[in-house]
Image (spheres, grey):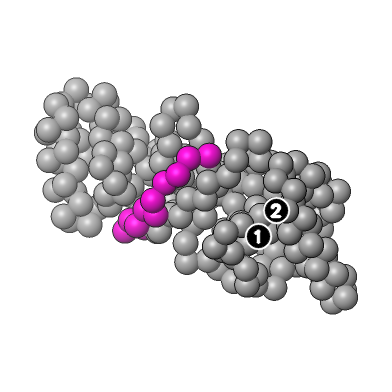
Amino acid sequence: MNKVARVIWNELVPQSPVFSTADVTRRTGVTLANASRDLRNLQAHGVVARIRRGLWAVPNHPDFSPYAVVPHLFAERQRGYVSLLSALSLHGMMEQIPQVVHIVTTSQRPVLRTPVATYAFYRIEKGLFGGFRPYRRTGNFDIATPEKALFDTLYFSARKGRRFAFLPEVELSAGFSHSELERWIRQISHSPLRTAVKLRWEALAGRVSAGT
């Protein structure tokens, strides 16, 4: 086992199964070119997976999940959180398991397809960026609260393009706060969009109440 491999198993993976080429060079003292070469060799043997340039993961590690990659997709002063159908699923509010990891952020980003998952980014206005907290069961990433995840879904379903217009059956979690979701609706600055989201929420709440 070479120096790069030893550092990955003994120092990096115990902290996180997702790491960068820069992490490897700092711990080993080898050049960036040599670290990249050794990582490519490990990738060829199916030991590590390249997420994108300079970012790697050990998918077979028991602590790995596709969500563990999310914090590593942003620069130091940027941020994004898991939301929409991904968060609704993790909160147990819907049975369907999304095939894509949905991430809300304040910048426009293209879809990222990787060997471990496809990551889709949804740009939201800065005034509506919030309502998330750490989720530590399967990777240290930020996740929308149940209320914010549902709000984000309704919000994007009402915007141009009507993404998530056909929402799977949703079950409100225990302790779900109607007032918290409605507080987010009131913060939408564009009046027609605010009205559209409010109507979608009222229709959904009515269906959920009728089913209980």
Q: Which residue is mark 1?
A: 158
Coordinates of residue 47 in the picture (x, y in percent): 24, 52
Residue 27 is situated, as x and y percent measured from the top left of the image, at 27, 25
Q: Amino acid at mark 2?
A: Leu
Above or below, comparing residue 77 to residue 184 in the picture: above
- Please give the label number shown on residue 193: 2
- Tell me which residue sits at (63%, 72%) in the image: 166
Mark 1 belongs to which amino acid? Ala
Q: Is 66 inside the magenta-drawn segment?
A: no
**Mark 1 residue crowding within 10 angstroms, few (<14) / some (14–19) / many (20+):** many
Helix, strand or loop at disc 1?
helix
Closer to the camera, 50 or 100? 100
Q: Is residue 112 rendered to the left or right of residue 148?
A: left
Q: Quadrant of the C terminus?
A: bottom right
**Residue 109 magenta:** yes
What stretch of residues is rendered in magenta?
Answer: 106-116
Q: Which SS type dominates the magenta stretch? A: loop
| Disc 1 + disc 2, Cβ < 8 Å | yes
Label 2 crowd bin: few (<14), some (14–19), many (20+), radius 10 Å: some
Left or right: 209, with 160 as reference point: right
